[in-house]
């Protein structure tokens, strides 16, 4: 699966361009099957580096790279996938949903 399409690149704002926004818009979601790891992208440098919300052991805002997503392996050698059905959402909604999921565990 292609993690980053040309169409998606065009939709992603450049790094630091939305840092004054109170509620970033999450443009795409990546996930590692059979784990709780998810990456929600809000900005991209056009080359390799993303900024967004990483939900894993300790959910947080931060930087991660396309190269990292390509090399991460999960159970049975599963690779990170892009959620092809994800629709952009405000970061506050994503965080709320993630918080609800972890509360239920």
Image: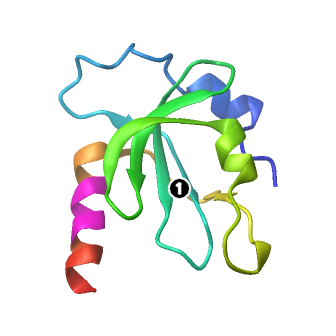
Image quarter where the N terminus lies is: bottom right
For the magenta stretch, what is the residue range?
A: 94-99
Q: Is residue 67 left or right of residue 98?
A: right
Q: Is residue 58 left or right of residue 6?
A: left
Magenta span contains residue 96: yes
- The crowd level at tag 1 (other Cα within 10 Å; few <14, some 14-19, many 20+) is few
- Identify the secondary structure beneath mark 1: loop
**What's the coloring here?**
rainbow
Residue annotated with mark 1: 86
Residue 11: image x %, image y %? 57, 28
Residue 89: image x %, image y %? 36, 47
Give the residue displayed 47% in from the left and 17% down from the top.
Answer: 15
Residue 100: image x %, image y %? 22, 73
Magenta span contains residue 7: no
Front residue (pair 70, 84): 70
Image quarter where the C terminus lies is: bottom left
Q: For residue 68, which quarter of the picture? A: top right
């Amino acid at each position: 699966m292609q993690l980053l399409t040309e169409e998606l690149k065009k939709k992603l704002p450049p790094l630091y361009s939305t840092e004054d926004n109170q509620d970033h818009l999450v443009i795409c979601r990546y996930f590692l099957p059979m784990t709780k790891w998810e990456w929600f992208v809000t900005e991209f440098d056009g080359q390799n580096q993303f900024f967004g919300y990483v939900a894993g052991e300790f959910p947080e805002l931060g930087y991660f790279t396309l190269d990292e997503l390509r090399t991460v392996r999960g159970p049975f050698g599963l690779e990170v996938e892009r959620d092809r059905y994800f629709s952009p959402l405000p970061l506050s909604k994503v965080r709320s949903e993630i918080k609800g999921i972890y509360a239920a565990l």
